[in-house]
Image (cartoon, grey):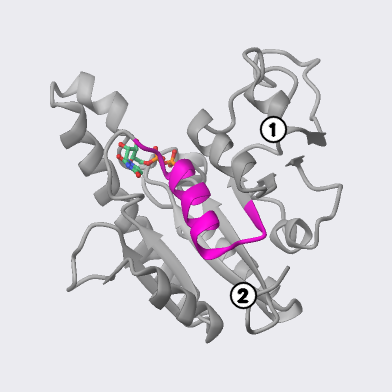
Amino acid sequence: SSTPSGKRRVLLKVSGEALAGDQGFGIDPAVVGSVAQEIATSLQDHDLEIAVVVGGGNFFRGSTFSEELHIDRASADYMGMLATVMNALSLQSALEHVGVPTRVQSAIEMKEVAEPYIRRRCMRHLEKGRVVIFGAGTGNPFFTTDTCAALRAAEIGATCLLKATKVDGVYSDDPVKNPEARLIPEMSFEEMESEDSIAVMDKTAVTLCRENNIPVVVFNIKTEGMLTQAVTGDRSVGTIIS
Ligand code: UDP
């Protein structure tokens, strides 16, 4: 399927953790730069429209901090959403640096910094060849940016959700603890939702993708050319969940 412009529309999710690189916190300029370059390259090579959801875990995760700082979960989650806006602005600058036009749309209104999220306006930007970066998640506490990615993918009619992470894909077991763990190239949503499966996405996100027939590709952000390969449905890329 394609959009009115005849292009394929994809939703890329970049976790905050991935943006932190090896330092584990904050933004690694090299990583943000390479993500921007990957996006620019795949835009050039393919008839694509790309929207991006950025996470915020490199700065702030609501569930962790609400316990540590004794703040209520909703407030902590709002702080997490604000963190994603910082990542969105950083990716915006990196993309514009490599000549890709962008817009940031925030689910929490902050008009001095970003446009508000308006679905139809977002789609217009995509049709005009701009990369739309979604900040502030869904705008609601108790959700994750993975769920936001699934939601936005469904809203804008994306053909797939590309989940860029720090790992190569979904493994049979934790590869850090178990050297025997192997990468699973393909799996079904049902397998993903089963109790003993390794969680790469929360259940709400998986359910949304399954119900809306949006396949998910989990791949390593560090591997050069991965985005282009993931977009073209290359089977050697990470894990495809459909
Ligand atoms: N968050 C939220 N609602 C959303 C999206 C995010 O409350 O719709 C908050 C939540 O506290 C989360 C934080 O923002 O922990 C950062 O997002 P996430 O953990 O999904 O980022 P990632 O793991 O992708 O870096």
Label 1 sits on residue: 189
The quarter of the image holding the N terminus is bottom right
User: In the rendered structure, does residue 151 fall within the stretch colored magenta?
Assistant: yes
The secondary element bearing badge 1 is classed as helix
- Nearest to the eye among marks 1 and 2: give it: 1
Magenta stretch encompasses residue 126: no
As drawn, 6 above or below 160: below
Q: Is residue 78 left or right of residue 26?
A: left
Provide residue 176's location: percent of width, then percent of height.
65, 20
Q: Quadrant of the C terminus?
A: top right
Q: Is residue 18 above or below residue 184?
A: below
**16 sits to left or right of 201:** left
Tell me which residue sits at (34%, 69%) in the image: 118
Query: Going 56% across and 35% down the picture, which residue do you hit?
Result: 207
Q: Where residue 169 appears, x then y in whole percent?
A: 70, 37
- Mark pair 1, 2: CA separation: 30 Å
Nearest the camera: 22 or 75? 75
Would residue 50 be found to the left or right of residue 59 on screen?
right
**Range of residues picked out in magenta:** 143-161
Q: Main secondary structure of the magenta part?
A: helix
Can you identify the residue that label 2 sits on? 40
